Image: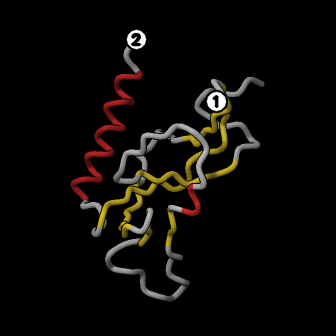
C-alpha cells in the first residue's frame, strides 16, 4: 500500500521546533545545545511560570509560547546532508520565542495567519 504524502513514514520520530528572534548568517553544523538553553518545565502539581517558558540564547533571556498548528497542518523536522534533505520527524511542539516577554497572542495570530496563507498558496494549481 502506497503512503500518502501527508502522512509521515512510520519510523519517523517527534521533534520540537523553535522560532528564535534572531538572524544568524551561518549555514552549517553548529553546537546549538551549547548556545540555546531551555529551563525545565514545571513539575507535575507545580504552577507554571506566569511569564511563560524561559530560555537563553547566547546569554540573552527569551520567553516563549507554544503554537498550536491549525487542523490539517503538519510541520516536519528535516536534516540536510549536502543537497539532500532527510525527514527527521514530525514536529510535536512548535515554540515561538521573544526577548524578555512571551510573544503576545496577537503575534501568535500573525504566525498562524502566515501558515494559512502558505497553505492557500500551495493549493493553487
Locate residue 4: give its quadrant. top right
Q: Is residue 16 above or below residue 75?
A: below
Q: Secondary structure at mark 1?
A: strand
Outermost residue, left side: 106
Q: Residue at x 31, y 45 (%)?
A: 111
Task: Spot the residue most to the top.
Answer: 125
Q: Is residue 86 above or below residue 109?
A: above
For the N terminus, the quadrant is: top right
42 to the left or right of 104: right
Mark whose residue sits in front, 1 or 2:
1
Q: Which residue is mark 2?
A: 125
How far apart are the alpha carbons under marks 1 and 2? 25 Å
Q: Earlier in the sequence, mark 1 or mark 2?
A: 1
| Residue under the point 65% across and 44% down | 89
Rendered-image quadrant of the C terminus: top left
Please identify the quarter of the rendering in which residue 2 is found: top right
Q: Residue 109 appears at what percent x and percent y?
A: 26, 49
| Residue shown at the point (30%, 63%) measured from the top left | 99
Front in this rendered view, residue 56 or 71 = 56
Where, by quadrant of the figure, is residue 98 drawn?
A: bottom left
Circle on res. 122: none
Above or below, 70 relative to 33: above
SS for tag 2?
Answer: loop
The residue located at (50%, 81%) in the rendering is 42
User: Residue 70: x percent and y percent?
Assistant: 40, 45
Tags 1 and 2 touching, CB below 8 Å: no
Task: Decide if residue 98 is on the left or right side of residue 39.
Answer: left
How is the structure coloured here? secondary structure
Q: Where is residue 46 drawn, in percent x and y?
A: 48, 88
Instruction: Point out residue 58 in the picture as x, y percentages from the top left corner.
Output: 44, 63
Residue assigned mark 1: 85
Amino acid at each position: 500500500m502506497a503512503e500518502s504524502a501527508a502522512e509521515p513514514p512510520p519510523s519517523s520520530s517527534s521533534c520540537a521546533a523553535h522560532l528564535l528572534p534572531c538572524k544568524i548568517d551561518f549555514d552549517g553544523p553548529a553546537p546549538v545545545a551549547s548556545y540555546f538553553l531551555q529551563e525545565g518545565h514545571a513539575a507535575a502539581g507545580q504552577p507554571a511560570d506566569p511569564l511563560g517558558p524561559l530560555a537563553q540564547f547566547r546569554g540573552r533571556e527569551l520567553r516563549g509560547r507554544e503554537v498550536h498548528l491549525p487542523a490539517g497542518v503538519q510541520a516536519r523536522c528535516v536534516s540536510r546532508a549536502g543537497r539532500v534533505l532527510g525527514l527527521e520527524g514530525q514536529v510535536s511542539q512548535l515554540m515561538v520565542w521573544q526577548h524578555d516577554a512571551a510573544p503576545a497572542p496577537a503575534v501568535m495570530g500573525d504566525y498562524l495567519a502566515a501558515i494559512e496563507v502558505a497553505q492557500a498558496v500551495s493549493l493553487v494549481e
